[in-house]
Amino acid sequence: MSSGRTVASAAEMFLCCWLGLVALIPTTLSTNPGVKVRLTEKGIEYGRQLGMAVIQQKLRSIKIPDFSGTEEVSPIGKVQYSLSNMHIVNVGLPKSSVDLVPGTGVTLSIGDAFISLNGNWRVKYLRIIKDSGSFDLNVNGLSIATTISIKSDETGRPAVSTASCSATVGSAKVKFHGGASWLYNLFTTFIDKALRNALQKQICPLVADAVSDLNPQLKTLNVLAKVDKYAEIEYSMVSSPTVLKSSIDLSLKGEFYNIGKHQEPPFSPAAFNLPPQNSNMLYIGMSAFTVNSAAFVYNNAGVLSLSVTDDMIPKSSPIRLNTKTFGAFIPQIAKQFPGLMMKLLVKTVKIPTLTFEPNNATVQATTTVTAFAIQTNSTLSPLFVLNLEASVSARMFVSEMKLAAAVTLNKMDLTLAKSYVGDFQVGPLENVFQGVLKWVVIPTVNGELILTLNSKEDFSPKVPKRISICIFSMHPKSWGILYKQLEGPTQSIQ
């Protein structure tokens, strides 16, 4: 029946909205995830509110297919009928709930729903009598409860199916207009009962079809999200969602790749667990594997380098990037290249590695620093190459809906790799390069580490205004982000 299709569409649209929070694309053969997500009952309730609002809006514009059938209506007998050109006039979903079913999925319940619609009718009975006109149909006391199973298909993408369904229709009242409607309206008690029974029989099969129709859409979910011109991230599920009594846990790959070239890094994700908490809406835990895979990708792309020139050093600094300053420590430079500006090229020679600790992360980086003298014709003359081993700490924080990391220098070791101006002692240069790191390199890195959560990139979640986020630590292998809904009234969907 048409209103049965409407309810099925409501279930389908609700699941689409809800899967937007739960289903995050295909799987891989990785044993351990790089990212874990926990959607709690509070998060599911927030998703329900958003989903029902969307359904309420969508149902008013849904196109209802024509419907025809045959019913035995006493005392007329067998009546062939068709209902066409139907439009929803009003719809109400005053009661709805989503409950978790451990090991299976979710149960969606809609209660005391009502639908009003109008359209055209056409009937044929007693073999020869035909008639037509318009009608108004009001369906009240519509309740449906369906349990939806959420698994992974053979590609790792989410697959849904109806595990159980029950539906009841309180009443269905029709009023005919036009033709001999005055006659048919005398028998609406019989017609209403026939319509109610027909509706009740068809709702669950229609719901099952609507849920099944989601699978082709789920198969089209994007596998990768572009981060920039060098990298993309795969945020795929590595296993089916784990449905518990009070939450749904998702295990996501969370791995960066070079665009168009999926090369696995020489390390694997270690096992980690989210903390046993359910007081907030959403928890996202990230292991060091995800960050290190990004370092692997950018190192392969050859972009983990930085050119430092004198204009990048604060004007108040007594240390300038020129042969005069460096000549004070290495006299050969001032003699061979007097009065010239200099340039430093800082470049990684090994993949930087990150480890998580409570409240901060530590990054170990091995780089080379090549110093050049800038000739008057802009050509570069190499002066020396240093090996630089550095350890920095990164403190994660959230400010104005931005996830950022403040990097500070822990220690630095310098050794001479090659000199074009003769041998010299590296020790006196340590203060100079500590200044360069603190004044130029680290501020540049801090600027690059800011991730705007409301950015337009596909991988960045859009955070509603009434949602707050903060960082929590999961020693020793991961960090996390939790999302918390700010307190405020909720509204019933009418």
Image (cartoon, rainbow, N blue to C red):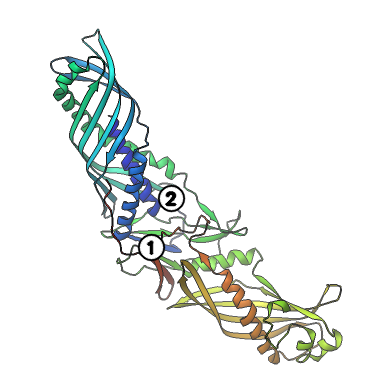
- Residue 157 position, x and y percent, is 43, 49
Above or below, 82 relative to 299: above
Relative to 433, say whether 204 is above or below: above
Residue 343 is marked as none
User: Quick check: 452 above or below 16?
Assistant: below
Residue at the image point whose x is 14% and y is 23% from the top: 190
Q: CA distance from mark 2 to mark 1?
A: 30 Å
Confirm whether residue 309 shows in the render: no
Can you tell which quarter of the image residue 162 is in? Answer: top left
Asked if labels 1 and 2 touch by Cβ distance under 8 angstroms, the answer is no
Question: Left or right of 343: which side holds 450?
Answer: left
- Foreground residue, 163 or 68? 68
Q: Secondary structure at mark 1?
A: strand
Residue at point 61%, 65% (across, down): 298
Picture quadrant of residue 299: bottom right
**Quadrant housing the N terminus:** top left
What percent of the width, then of the height, locates residue 471?
41, 71
For label 2, the residue is 156
Check disc 1 and report the residue beneath it.
467
75 vs 370, left or right, is: left
Kind of residue indicated by mark 1: Ile
Where residue 175 sits in the image (x, y, percent)? 21, 25
